Amino acid sequence: MDRLTGTASKRLLAACILLAAAPAAMATLPTDGEIAVAEIRRRIENRDCTGAIERLKEGLAKNEAEVALMGGSMFEHGVCVRRDWQRAIPLYVRASEGGQQEAAERLAAGYADPANGPDAASAIWWAWRGRDFRLEGCGVDGKMPLDPDRLVAEMGKWPATQLAYCVYVAGVMSTISAEMRYPELAAGVAVGGDVSLRFYPATPRVELQQTGSQDYELVGYFAVDRLRDRKRKAVTGGFANAVGEVADRALKRYPHPAGMPQDAVIESRYTFYIK
């Protein structure tokens, strides 16, 4: 029997994804890893790949989780190095073990990508360890798998349509949460907002609804024009645009499998706030 026939097994009620930004005058001191990542990015922008790789190696030697995440992304996308998914994997694992949830999402997204294999069990395992995957029909006893071998054994009982569904949803939702970024215009004028997402895997399509925006206190010295900028549509409507752009990329990344349950709907909410 197809285990995707129950509505509960097809509806993902993900935890709210929080994306924070801090005004420069209020920002906490960056960690050593964050400083290293900023330096690596600056060298990449200046086309100094030799310097970027040297700084990457320094950060990895110090076990900086943020640098491991950056290194995984560089190998995954071929930035200053030859693209090599197999070399990206251990760096993402190190980053995840160091508390970088985005790394788990990038592992799930990468393992679900046909360009890298795919590896269905690894995609589902890592998707559960990200921020945006809580699909009961894709776990063990409806919960996050804690034993890789038990997950593999459970997956062996799934019909092909269930396996394809779980991997597809894991890839799309993990890509969205991994690649989501705070809109720069909104962060610059201390504006936050909420976006609700509904993903219909059978179509496939995504519906977005921005449920409002919120002005946070501007700190330090600022021009009066910044107050007017808060009301610009490019600022107040930028949150839905940011989610939509990432969602479009995620849908294009993965081939749409046949046999998706027609009434399946995946729901998630993204909250952008100033801390």
Image (spheres, grey):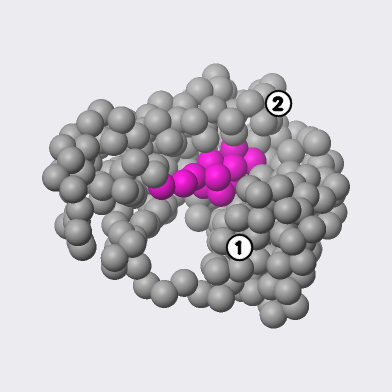
Between residues 177 and 67, which one lies in front from this camera angle?
Answer: 67
Please give the name of the residue rendered at 50% of the width and 55% of the height, measured from the top-left corner: 131
Image-quadrant location for residue 260? top right
* Residue 246 point in image, percent of width and height: 52, 35
Magenta span has 31? no
Residue beneath disc 1: 39
| SS category of the residue bearing label 2 | loop
* Residue 91 point in image, percent of width and height: 74, 63
User: What secondary structure do most residues of the magenta stretch adopt?
Assistant: helix
Q: Earlier in the sequence, mark 1 or mark 2?
A: 1
* Residue 221 point in image, percent of width and height: 19, 59
Label 1 – label 2 distance at C-alpha: 36 Å
Label disc, if present, on residue 255 of the rendered structure = 2
Residue type pointed to by label 2: Pro
Magenta-tinted stretch = 171-182
* Circle 1 residues within 10 Å: few <14, some 14–19, many ≥20: some
